Every structure is written in C-alpha cells, then in structure tokens.
C-alpha cells in the first residue's frame, strides 16, 4: 500500500524522511548495536541524543538563557494540573475559555485555585478568539490555549500581561510559526502533533517560576523543580520519542526553521480556506481573524442535520478510499476537519481540494 495523506489531529503524520531515518537506525543506532528503544537513558549513547534535542529546541524556538527545557510525560493534560500546583501563591488565576481543551484546563486548575474566566468564546460555539488586549489583576498566572484543535481557532495576538506570568498550551501549533518565548512564563506541548510520536511533553519554563515550595504534598513527579534538578531524568524519560523529536527538529531546521514552517503552513492553509470561502457547497467554521493554520474544520452547507450527518459520513468514507484519511470532525462537533501540521505537504492539500471538488459535483 502506498502512503496516505493523514489529516489526523493527533497523533499526526511525521515527515517521511524522518520515518525512513528512524527505520534505518531501528536495530543499530550509530554503531552501538542496539536500538534507541533498548538504551539506558543514563548511557553514554543516549546522552548526546537528549543534548542534541534540547539544543535544537533552544535554537529553533529562540529560547532565552533564563528558561529551562524539559521533556516530561503525561501530555498537555498533566500540565493542566502541574501549572496550578507549581505556580500557586495567592491562589487566584486568570483563564481564557476558547474551547474543549481550555475548559479542561480550567476545570483542573479549579481544584487548587480560584479561577477567573476573564473571557470566553463559548457563546460563538468557540468559532473565534475573544478580544483580550491586556490581562491585569492579582493573579498568580494567566493561561491561554494558543491553538484550539477542535474548532480550528488560534490567537492572532498574544495578550499583554505585565508582571503576571503568561502560560500557554501550544500543543497543536508548536513550531508552526515563530513565537516569542520571552512573552511567556511557561509553554507546554504534547509532542504528537508537530514534534514526535505520542509520549513526550515539551515544557519550557522561566527560571523564576521554578519553586521548591509548590502546593503542599505535591507528588515529586508533578514538581517542576524535581525535573529541572534531574535534567528530565528523575525517572526514565520516553527515550525513543525524544530521539524521534530530535529527527523532526533537524527536518524543521533543514526546511527553514520556524520561519520556513510559517511560509509552508500559510500557503497550505490559505489554499484550503480560499477554496472553502469560494465554495457553494462547503464552508469553514472558524471566523476570519481567528483561523488556525493547523486545524481547519469545515462542513457542507446542508441545513438538515440528519441529511448533513449522512453526507459527512459518506465524505469521510470516500475520502479514505481515495487515500485521504482521518478527516472526520471531532466527535463533539461533527462535520469534517483537516489537520495540516508541519509534515503535511502542499500536495496533500491539493489532493484534498481535488477530492472535495469531485465530491461536491457528485453530491450537490
């Protein structure tokens, strides 16, 4: 079987050359006679892998010297708890509700903090980002979800927070375009969308936020200082996933870094949005000004819910037969969704548009 175009929201497709490189080293990495999967995380063979991956993160994201880079586990969902457990001082935090994952972060933080939802796009069914210019108040931190995977929205402008540490979930947009790390106190990202297979979580944290006095009785594994002191090796890290992340970062570097990814992603997204906006059959669901480069949900213009559901299922099934897979919208919202992360080539978007045009003619 030839490779398909995988539009999954995550785990997502990886660059083919990364997969081929990993395959070539599967049984013998760098002449060691063993797979990275088999290595001790404390071995001389693995240490350079970890060091290279961190160095590439720092280079490609222009991470300032006063930030630590961590490779943790538990996905972004565990960070929903680690952030309040480690940043709580006065016990009050500001959150912006822009979708399902923001809601989950809010709910988790509410177990330890007084949470102020200072803005929300819930009334628009999360199809836009609320206008938040400046965040002020006696908050321990403020939290945003930079890209919203399910509804396909992203923050076009980062809010100003002054001395309040800004925390962001960047799972589905990390290294899709340049990002000023210095505007944030903490950035975190599950790797399974733009960086690596599932299993490792990238955390970038400003040094002054690493405290040795988190919430009382916080487990050692949920303390940032634990992982900083041990260089992400307090316990066995996800070694193979970190190795693949390093390969992906090398691929990004070779293809122009964050700036190169932004050019590539803007071209793909613009092509698909332009088609949707001009189509008499389809429509994008995210509002202009808030549209994601990474996740593009869309629907047909059928207004009858039952008929629309039938058409949607037919679209997804026929697309899969055409080698375009994982185009079903999230189970909570339905419709369709094309996730076009860094590794998705322009040819994949062109193939999708050609299929959509054919399907529209046959089903209008």
Image (spheres, grey):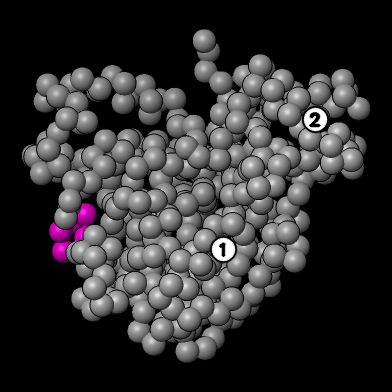
Q: In which quadrant is the C terminus drawn?
A: top right
Q: Residues within 10 Å of mark 1 (few under 14, many from 20)?
A: some
User: Taking the image as drawn, is residue 66 in sight?
Assistant: no
Q: Which label was assigned to residue 310?
A: 2
User: Taking the image as drawn, is residue 75 in sight?
Assistant: yes
User: Relative to 140, does residue 360 appear above or below in the rendering?
Assistant: above
Residue topped by disc 1: 103
User: Relative to 281, does residue 2 appear above or below in the rendering?
Assistant: above
User: Residue 19, position in %: x, y?
Assistant: 38, 25
* Residue at image coords 81%, 21%: 358
User: Residue 244, position in %: x, y?
Assistant: 32, 35
Q: Which region is colored magenta?
A: 227-232
Q: Residues within 10 Å of mark 2 (few under 14, many from 20)?
A: few
What whole-number distance in Å separates the C-alpha atoms at marks 2 and 1? Answer: 30 Å
User: Relative to 257, does residue 178 appear above or below in the rendering?
Assistant: below
In this picture, residue 253 sits left or right of residue 352: left
Query: Which is more toward the observer, 267 or 147?
Result: 147
Instruction: Tell whether position 72 is magenta.
Output: no
């Amino acid at each position: 079987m030839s490779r398909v175009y995988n539009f999954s929201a995550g785990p997502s497709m990886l660059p083919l050359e990364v997969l081929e490189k990993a395959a070539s080293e599967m049984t013998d990495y760098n002449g060691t006679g063993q797979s990275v999967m088999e290595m001790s995380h404390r071995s001389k063979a693995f240490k350079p892998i970890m060091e290279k991956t961190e160095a590439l993160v720092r280079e490609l994201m222009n991470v300032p010297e006063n930030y630590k880079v961590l490779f943790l586990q538990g996905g972004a969902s565990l960070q929903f708890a680690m952030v309040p457990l480690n940043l709580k001082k006065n016990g009050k935090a500001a959150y912006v509700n822009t979708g399902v994952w923001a809601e989950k972060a809010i709910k988790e933080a509410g177990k330890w903090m007084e949470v102020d939802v200072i803005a929300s796009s819930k009334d628009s069914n999360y199809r836009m980002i609320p206008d938040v210019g400046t965040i002020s108040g006696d908050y321990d931190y403020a939290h945003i979800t930079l890209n919203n995977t399910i509804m396909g929205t992203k923050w076009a402008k980062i809010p100003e927070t002054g001395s309040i540490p800004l925390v962001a979930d960047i799972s589905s947009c990390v290294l899709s375009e340049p990002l000023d790390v210095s505007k944030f106190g903490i950035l975190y990202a599950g790797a399974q969308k733009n960086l690596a297979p599932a299993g490792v979580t990238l955390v970038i944290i400003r040094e002054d936020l690493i405290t040795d006095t988190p919430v009382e009785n916080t487990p050692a594994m949920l303390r940032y200082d634990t992982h900083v002191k041990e260089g992400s090796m307090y316990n066995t890290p996800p070694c193979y996933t970190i190795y693949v992340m390093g390969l992906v970062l090398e691929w990004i570097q070779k293809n122009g870094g964050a700036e190169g990814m932004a050019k590539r992603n803007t071209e793909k997204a613009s092509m698909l949005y332009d088609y949707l906006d001009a189509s008499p059959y389809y429509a994008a669901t995210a509002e202009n000004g808030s549209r994601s480069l990474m996740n593009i949900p869309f629907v047909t213009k059928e207004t009858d819910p039952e008929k629309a559901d039938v058409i949607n299922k037919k679209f997804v099934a026929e697309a899969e037969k055409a080698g375009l897979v994982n185009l079903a919208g999230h189970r909570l919202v339905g419709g369709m969704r094309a996730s076009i992360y860094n590794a998705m080539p322009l040819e994949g978007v062109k193939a999708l548009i050609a299929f959509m045009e054919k399907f529209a003619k046959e089903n209008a």
